[in-house]
Image: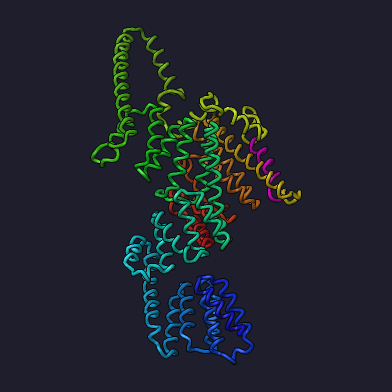
Amino acid sequence: HLVKALKHSASKALDRGDYAHAIDGFSKAIKALPDPTLDSFLYATLQTKCAEAHLCMNEYSQCIRYADEALEIDERIPEAYLHKANAHLAMGKFEDAAVILTIGSKRVEHSEFFEKNLDHARQLIETMKALECLKTAGLHSELIKASDSLDDSLISNKHILLVRARAFLSLDQIDNAIGEATQIISMDSRNIEALIILTKSYYLGGNIDNALIECQKALAVDEKEATELYDTIRDVAQSLILTERAIQNGHFKQACTLSSQTIYAAEPLAKSSPLFRKLYLARSEANLYAENYSAAISNANAVLESLPESLDAWSIKIKSMEAQGSHTQLAEELNVVISTNNGEWGAGQKLLVEAFDRATQSAAASASQQQQNDTTKNKMGDHNNNNNNTSGDNNSNNTQDNNHHPNSEHHHQGSSTSEHHHHHNAMMEGGNQHGSDDILSDSYDILGVRRDESSLEEIFEIYQSKVRKYSEEELIKNGFTDTERGEALEKLKLLQDSMVIVLSDQRSRLWDQGGGSDAMVRMADYLKDIATAAFDDKNFKSAAQGFAEAITALADPTLDSAMYQELHIKCAEAHLEIREFSKCIRFLDEALEVDDQIPEAYLFKARAHMHMN
């Protein structure tokens, strides 16, 4: 009577979807049955029902175990075969499911019970094989089209949904990827692959908050699988907050540095992803406020390459070009955008049309002024021709001096790197940016060095000695508590941020003192030596940061392409050692863009992918 009462209660729980209580009830009934041989049918039924409840809970291994125990008592129970087959289908083992159903059809008298399920299993096998072939070939659009034509019983299978979600993510169809992954999670809340896809979709879509929430769920399911992704998203989120805070506080140069760090922290990003646009737009805005107009335009252009209709990017670009006085170029670019030949979008945007009108008027005014200046110069030239030779020689010497002056018009028409460094010095020394002097002064004070007296070697020696105090070995050796470790890491972060600002200032000063590109190469070479020493000491985290700083100092790969490649390879190797595989791949890809014949790059990249898989 007790067994039947427990069975009845558990069956009621199963019918109303209370699977946990159903499993508990059937398990107690199985244990309460004193001798299974006295009522083998009841025992097998209880095992089969318990298997069904576990199947509903997505507990597939337990489902199979109870189904097998039922079949050991009676191999003619059709439901046991069906639950076992469905568990294998849910695990993606379609061929195993087909074998189980085939065996069941031979052992059970009414084999028609299995025919429909067996046909379904065979369809799944063929469908998954076809979709996997398309996925392997990288034909993601074709995969979506092929799966769109499937009937409801197939397209609702979570493994087919998973293949589709991956394909949508590869195509940067973020909303569709979110939809497929969400549907899988509604069926199986602990499906780690779906949780990872959902996390990446929110992340690449620029929805950092939701990405963190979903990644925390993934961590609860499989910490090893989700940790690296969570760390990346968290770093990006923190950097974005700091960048916004710096802009709000008027610390625009610091915002430029932080926005670059944010991009560095992010995984390698496709230009078509919303996150790419979000990060580059933030850096463009920071450079606009810092009056680094060339950098602001460059970053805005990166956004516009991905999304030509981005009004935020156009707004920054327009303000920057107007501030530079590039009215003719701006008018030419806007003329193309607002032309009806390119559709109605640009012509209907008030921001673009008004900017075009301003640029056209300013360009016309500049042309008129230039014409007047030319006329005046011609008249003065005629007058000067009547002067004596001595006067002519003096004018010639003055002209020659002007042509070599670093602030001459000729100089400013040089490389964008030259413009950046001279503008940087104007910002730091001329006080054009509110608060920039304070930030620079504070950074030197935090490092404990003097801007005008400390050499670059002294700065790095002092910086390295301070950083060593907060190394993992020192913290362990001195027995720091968790609270003290947290405070130490905050001080270390402050030192690193200050060093970035000081490094940028020193690079600009070296440019002016040493003739430009040669000074940048010397600085990069010096930083490379320090990073190499850290690498040799197996301090790979410091090495990775050091090589990255050297890359920043070099700035332009054309200055020394061999060093540029070497720095990227060594930086990638350091990231590989500390298991930061995405960052490793990013530096290798940048090296291969310059030279695609570097064997070490392919070797390290293969190792990184192997670890990620």
Taking 543 as reference, is 150 left or right? left
Locate residue 234 relative to residue 201 in the image: left or right. Answer: right
Q: Main secondary structure of the magenta part?
A: helix
Count all numbered tags in the image, as a single digit: 0
The part of the image, by quadrant, that contains residue 123 is bottom left
Res 418 visible? no
The image shows residue 65, relative to residue 480, as above or below, that is below
Going 37% across and 36% down the picture, which residue do you hit?
314
399 vs 555, nearest the viewer: 555
Q: Describe residue 330's horizontal placement relative to residue 22 as left or right.
A: left
217 versus 7 height, above or below: above
Residue most extreme to the bottom: 38
Answer whether residue 242 is visible to the viewer in this image: yes
Residue 109, picture quadrant: bottom left
> Which span is picked out in magenta?
459-473
Question: Among all residues in the image, which is located at the extreme top?
Answer: 387
- Could you tell whether 432 is left or right of 479 in the image? left
